[in-house]
Image: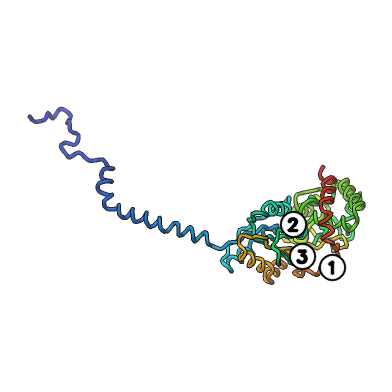
Amino acid sequence: MSPDPNKPNANPDNGKPKQKPLDYFLWCEITPRTGWLVLFACLICGILLPTISQVRAKSPSVVIYTSQDEEYADPIFKDFEKQTGIQVRAVYDSEAVKTVGLANRLLAERNHPQCDVFWNNEELRTRLLAAQGIFRETNGWSTMGYRTRRLVVNTNLLSLARAPHSFSEATNEMWRGKVALAYPLFGTTAAHFQALRQQWGDERWQNWCRALAANKPMIVDGNSVVVKLVGAGEASFGFTDSDDIAGAQREGLPVAALPLNDESLLIHNTVGVLRGAPHPSAAQQLFEYLQSKPVMDRMLTEHALESTVSDESTTQPGLKVNWEALLHDLDSGTAEAKGIFLR
């Protein structure tokens, strides 16, 4: 019997063979053609990936903790990588606590060192770590050039004739609320204050610190902040480092460094190799590279250093520090500074 043209066709395919699902063809048609290729690719990945991982794991590297400003240090590390093929993994400090944080970390890791090289832009904490046996026994650490602690003034507010010419003058009533400094518990400010304590004696130093605190100074997180406050005219002058003054001058701020005096401090950069460094060969290469003439000259040009000659400290104006005695008295001096400036 012929189908009724007025009724819907029961077979929507009008008698055509029913199509198989796509996944059926993928399995029956595609897989036989490509299965061997997929299997081959899996085998290749299984062979090559572990090999690639091993190559990466064996790539030379060195870990450095540094308080040097990243703007100066990072280009130096990149040049070292290009010259040696050794990857530099750098850990920087924070502006607020500076070297103290890195020094405490090295002490905490002393039984399982994670760091190879410590590049410090000040001397006190390096000497403290050396006394704790953190650096290798032979040729453990070295000084490398210096910058200085200076008074910085806003040249729009103060002529050089009217400006204070010593740090001790900051307690004068005329400078009330007009001087800026970083917390004297960290970084170069801490080293400077402790050196002044040694020079003046504890009683005179404590009296000066209390008078300074009573004169309402702006105590801030870091020397670069000090220079910015002075440059903005919020402070007339401040205690800071010479490299921060040079950086502010490059930015066009109206600041100037006052000449060195007997209360100034020369601040040596230092570099050391850790006892039990995980990558001793790479550590030695970086240790030597950082003390090389091209690197030192570069830092001098960029004003990260004022001199590449470390032993000039004996002929320049400034505090002559007995470091062994200062380290012996450091805990008591730090406790006194906390009691005066942290309230």
Check contact, mark 2 vs mark 1: CB within 8 A.
Answer: no
Q: Position of residue 40 (x, y in %)?
A: 34, 56
One can see residue 252 in this view: no
Determine whether, in the image, residue 326 is placed left or right of residue 252: right
Q: Position of residue 59 (x, y in %)?
A: 53, 62
Three-letter code for the amino acid on which mark 3 is drawn: Tyr
Q: Quadrant of residue 77?
A: bottom right
For label 2, the residue is: 132
3 or 1: tag closer to the N-terminus: 3
Determine whether, in the image, residue 81 is placed left or right of residue 299: left
Q: Position of residue 202 (x, y in %)?
A: 90, 53
Q: Quadrant of residue 187?
A: bottom right
Q: Which mark is residue 146?
A: 3
The crowding category of the residue bearing disc 1, from other C-alpha atoms within 10 Å (few below 14, some 14 to 19, many at least 20), is some
How far separated are the C-alphas under marks 3 and 1? 11 Å
Label 3 SS: strand
166 or 27, which is in the foreground?
Answer: 27
3 or 2: tag closer to the N-terminus: 2
For label 1, the residue is: 316
The crowding category of the residue bearing disc 2, from other C-alpha atoms within 10 Å (few below 14, some 14 to 19, many at least 20), is few
